[in-house]
Amino acid sequence: MSAVAPISIMRLATSSMSVHQRAMDVIANNIANVNTVGFARSRPEFAEVLSSELGDSAGVELAGVRRLWRQGVVQRTERELDLAVQGDGLLVVRLPTGALGFTRNGSIQRAANGLLVTQDGYPLDPPLSIPAGAERIRIDPDGTVFAQAGGGVAWTEVGRIQLASFANVEGLAHWAHGIFVETEASGPPQLGMPGAEGRGTIVAGALEGSAVDLAEEMVDLVLAERAYSLSVRLAQTADEMQSLANQLVSR
């Protein structure tokens, strides 16, 4: 059995330190968003790196950060423009670039011109405008939006909210503030009405809570910190071995 060179041990240790530092960053971001509406937690995934020249393990690398799209708890707010998606599907917005964006954050606002927009001012797509003078808004599970004039009893339909689904929702790229855009990995959006073709339904007067389990994240953080500490100790040992080898050679 051939001995493992100190340089190989150092390579393994430093690569392990790097990926576990990145893992701690990902977990810390999950924890920071434990109260963020519609937040989907991320999970780091590792891969072994082999050296074809040396024939030994060259270390580990971060293969990617996987976003886990699982349903958060739907919490009642009783605010008529708060929307939660029960099941699969993402709300569709129009970004300043002209592209479509997709989100689970249904905290919708009514702009001064009556347009329904996100907290960042991005309008829903297709655009929905509430008539001037409407004091009450009702949104049904199938996405149909109704408005009621002040003092009136009749409800007037003003449009419908659509949802998007994807062949591979994990392939979406994060754009900003909980909004995602399509990629080749996600495939194009399948747009349609809530409740149709497996899409979720709209729950008005509610928001979807973060999908982060704080206890689970704390356990993962402790494990990542321990792995990082072990990698540091391994690097120190490799350095000591190299120093000893250099001393023996110099004699």
Image: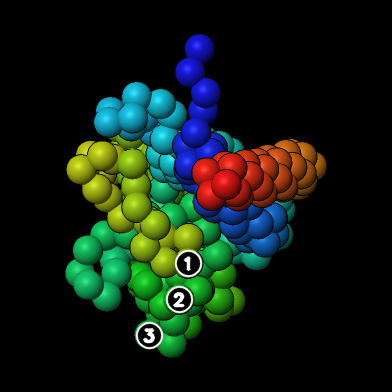
Asked whether 49 or 100 is in front, the reply is 49
Label 3 CA crowd tier, 10 Å (few <14, some 14–19, many 20+): few
Frontmost of labels 2 and 3 is 2
Residue 174 location, x and y as percent?
A: 39, 57
Residue position for label 2: 120
Relative height, residue 157 to residue 214 (above, below) = below
Disc 1 versus disc 2: distance between alpha carbons? Answer: 8 Å
Q: What element carries label 3?
A: loop
Tell me whether circle 1 and circle 2 mark residues in contact (CB < 8 Å). Answer: yes
Q: Nearer the viewer, residue 181 or 199?
A: 181
Expressed as whole percent of the image width and height from the top left, the position of residue 216 reads 74, 39
Of callouts 1 and 3, which one flags the residue occurring earlier in the amino acid sequence?
A: 3
Q: Mark 2 packing: few (<14 Cα in 10 Å), some, or many (20+)?
A: few
Q: Which amino acid does label 3 sit on?
A: Asn
User: In the drawing, what numbered circle is on residue 223?
Assistant: none
Specify the color scheme. Answer: rainbow
- Between 96 and 13, the one lying in front of the other is 13
Q: Which mark is residue 177?
A: 1
Residue 250: % across, % down:
53, 49
Reply above or below: 152 against 45.
below
Q: Which amino acid does label 1 sit on?
A: His
Residue at 52% across, 23% down: 3
The picture quadrant where one finds residue 111 is: bottom left
Q: Hey, what amino acid is under mark 2?
A: Asp
In the rendered image, residue 73, in percent from the top left (x then y), is placed at 68, 43
Q: In this view, does 65 lie to the left or right of 214?
A: left
Q: How far apart are marks 2 and 3 (CA)?
A: 15 Å
The residue that disc 3 covers is 113
Of the two numbered discs 1 and 2 on the same chain, state the one appearing first in sequence: 2
